[in-house]
Structure formats: structure tokens, C-alpha cells
Image: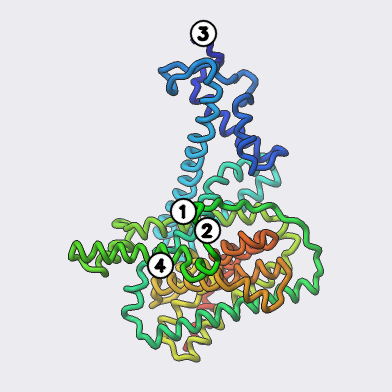
Amino acid sequence: MADTLVVAKKSPLSSILARHFCTSFAWSSSVFSPDDRDYQYSLLGTCKSCGNQDVLPKSISSGSIGSATDDDSPAFTAKLCQNVLPKIHLIFSLGIMLAMDLLLKQAFEAAEIEFPSALFGMFCMFLVLIILDLLIPAIAVGLMSFFEPAVLFIHRWLPLFYVPSLVVLPIVVKDIPAASEFKILGILVGGWLASLCVAAFTALAVRNCVRTEMIPAEPMPKPTPFSALEIWLPSGFKIVLHPIICCALSADFAAFAYGYISKSGFDEILGCYLTNASRDPGAGDVLMGFLGSVIISFAFSMFKQRKLMKRHAAEIFTSIIVGTIFSLYSTALAGRLVGLDRSLTVSILPRCITVALALSIVSFFEGANTSVTAAVVVLTGLVGANFVQFVLDKLRVRDPIARGIATASSAHGLGTAALSAREPEALPFCAIAYALTGIVGSLICSVPAVRQSLLAVIG
């Protein structure tokens, strides 16, 4: 060990971990782009961290992290940093967000507070970031950098968290009359189109009044494709067989096959897949357990785009408030006009709001079917994801701000994901509207007078 240059009696592993997290912190405040990962990781081979005394080990003995010679030790260390430490970073950051969501949910249930616990957590995180940015900006930037892997993971896998709602759809619709199913489908499609138009033209009207010049937004990182097959599949194929639909159908097929072989039955297997019981969760419950962390991640998205929100506050907030109110009350009125059952109408009220907050909203009302709510929200997102760009083009809505707000206000997360690949200039506004639509809808429905007025419209 005489040739190992380690001071202050630090182990090689602790030195490597220190380098990783200090370098991650340095990325956020340096002039280098966070996307240039190869170059940033190459810095780990020569950089100093946590003071001038830490020097990269020249060799690592067999008793530490494997065995390496004097010549390949730097390469081994760099490879370890590149492959292992980012995964550890992801596990820690994502684990903290999941633990935060779970603790808040338990505290709100114990205190019998009806307000969505994840939304409260999001507000707290956003407030902490704002205060730190005012007092100690470096810490705010470091906090953003620490949670960045978790936020990217959530955004990448977001569509998968919606799948359980579609998997159990066969047993959800079993007790719903066919006539009611067609009524719900009509409200879903017609309501999506109406909400899209209201949000788009409201944004355009406000844009024409304020005439705020559009400036470049903070770049939004894009998740990489899951496989090469995802890249070359034709768009027409994806419209007919959306990845979420394919995933749900394959899960249903597997459940049917297992139920047939085991003699348990299809319905029983789906009941085990999504139990809605915290003490006996199924695979679907595990996936939907990430929905709370999706809401908390809104804090980081909004903080990153805070300058854009401030500059275009008139367009963003006016369009979202008008669009959300229109969506809620138009759905209530449409259900009454077509004679839809009261409980079903209540269940589909938050059709344009992301699943996690939509489920919290219908919990304010008695008799709502949360399974119907989740399924309708996901189906609305699928309709928007496939047709939003075509409809906006036909309506001649060219403004990126209006397109982004209208997409998220009518098709929430799935619409946002569909827009990210083709319209990067509209994506920041879409991401902001996606978060704010759910927040505004939850705040509006948390007011008892608003709930009573919605029930009066439903009849």
C-alpha cells in the first residue's frame, strides 16, 4: 500500500463516492451541459474533490474494490464511477421521494385530512427550493442536481404507472351497462376536443393582449428510447397499438392464461393484480404506488421553469384556470344531458387531470368509482396523445405556448410525452401546464362550495 496516495485515512470507496457526489454538485453550477455525460465522467479520473488532499488512488489492493494494477486503476475507477455510482445515486434520490410520499400519506390519513398529501409535499418542496434559491442558490442547485436522476426516472417510466388502470378495465366495465359505456366514451372524446379548443384559444387570446415576447426556455431532458424497435416503428402502427395498450393487453393475456391453467379464473387473477390494499399489494399496486412521487416531482419541473412561468404567467395561469373549470363543469353538464348515472358522472369529472390527482379529487365525493376514474383519465390521455397535433394543426394553432398549454390541459402526461419528441419548443409550456392543471383542479375541488355546485349541475 506504499504506492497508494490516500490521505486523511480515507478508504478508496469513500473517496470515490465523495468524488461522484461532489462532481454531480459541480455539474449543476459549472458551464458544462448536464447532457455531456461522457465528458463529465472523464473528469472523474483526474479531478480533486472535498479539498486538495484527496488524490485518485494509484492502485487498489485486492482487499478493497477488486484487484487492479497500477496501470489500469484509473480506468477501473472511472468505469466504476460511470456504471455503479449513478445507480446508487438513483436509488437514494428515488427512495427519498418514495419515502416522503409514504410518510405524508400516513400522516394525512392519521390526521383525517382530505387534502392530497402528495400535493402538499410538492408545495413544500417547491417552497424549500424557492427559499434556498433566494438565500443560498448553490444549495438549491445542488438539491436539484441530487434529485435529477429520480425525476428523470419518473418521467421516463410515467406511462407504465398508468397501465394498471387499463389492465383491470375488463372487470371495471362488467357492471356498467353498455349504454352507459357509450355515453362515457362520447363524453370522453367530445370533452377532450372541447377542452383542447378552450385552452388553446384562451391562451391565444391572452397572448394577443399581453404580447409578451417568447424567449428560449430551459432545455428539457428527453428520455432515451427503450429499444431500437421503438425508433423505427411507423407512427400509424403506434396510433393503433400504443405502447400502453400493448402492455395492458399483454398483461391481460397473461392473466387470462394463468387463470385458465390454475383454474383460478380471469377475474380473480386481476383482483390479485390490483388489490387497492396497502397490506396486500399486487403488481399493479406497486406501479401505482409511484403516482405520489410523480406529483412531488412537479416541484422540480416548476422550479426549473420558474423564470418562464413568471414571464408568461398571464397566458399560463389564465388558460389553465379557465380550461380546468370548463373541463369540470362541462363534464358534469354533459353527464346530466345524456342521462348518465350520477356516480359515473362524478367518477369521470377529472378526466383531464393526471391519474394521481384525479383519484384524490374523486375521493372528495361520495359514491365515486376510482377504477372508472383511472381508466377514463388514461383513455383521455391516449386520445390526446394520438390526435392532439393533428387537431391543433387543423385549428391552425401555431403558437408554441398555446399548443403546449392546450395539450397538457386536455391530455395531461400522455399528451406531454407525445409532444416531447416532435415539438421541443412547446414542451416546457406543456410540462408546466401538466403540473398546474392537476394542482389547480385539486385546489378548486377542495373547496366545499365548488363540490356542491358540481353536484347541483349533475343533478
Looking at marks 1 and 2 on the same chain, the residue that comes earlier in the sequence is marked by 1
The numbered dot on residue 121 is: none
Q: Report if residue 159 is visible in the image.
A: yes
Looking at marks 1 and 4 on the same chain, the residue that comes earlier in the sequence is marked by 1
Q: What separation in Å lies between label 4 and label 2 (alpha carbons)?
A: 18 Å
223 sits left or right of 171 in the view: right
Q: Residues within 10 Å of mark 3 (few under 14, many from 20)?
A: few
Q: Secondary structure at mark 4?
A: helix
> Which residue: 65% across, 68% down?
405
Give the residue at mark 3.
Answer: 2
For the residue pair 8 and 338, the one nearer the viewer reads as 338
Q: Secondary structure at mark 2?
A: helix
- Nearest to viewer (mark 2 / mark 3): 3
Give the residue at mark 4.
Answer: 165
- Nearest to viewer (mark 1 / mark 2): 2
The numbered dot on residue 295 is: 2
Tell me, yes or no, whether the two marked residues, 4 and 2, touch with CB atoms within 8 Å: no
Identified by mark 2, the residue type is Ile
Q: What separation in Å lies between label 4 and label 3 (alpha carbons)?
A: 61 Å
Looking at marks 3 and 1 on the same chain, the residue that comes earlier in the sequence is marked by 3
Q: What separation in Å lies between label 3 and label 1 (alpha carbons)?
A: 48 Å
Give the residue at mark 1.
Answer: 101
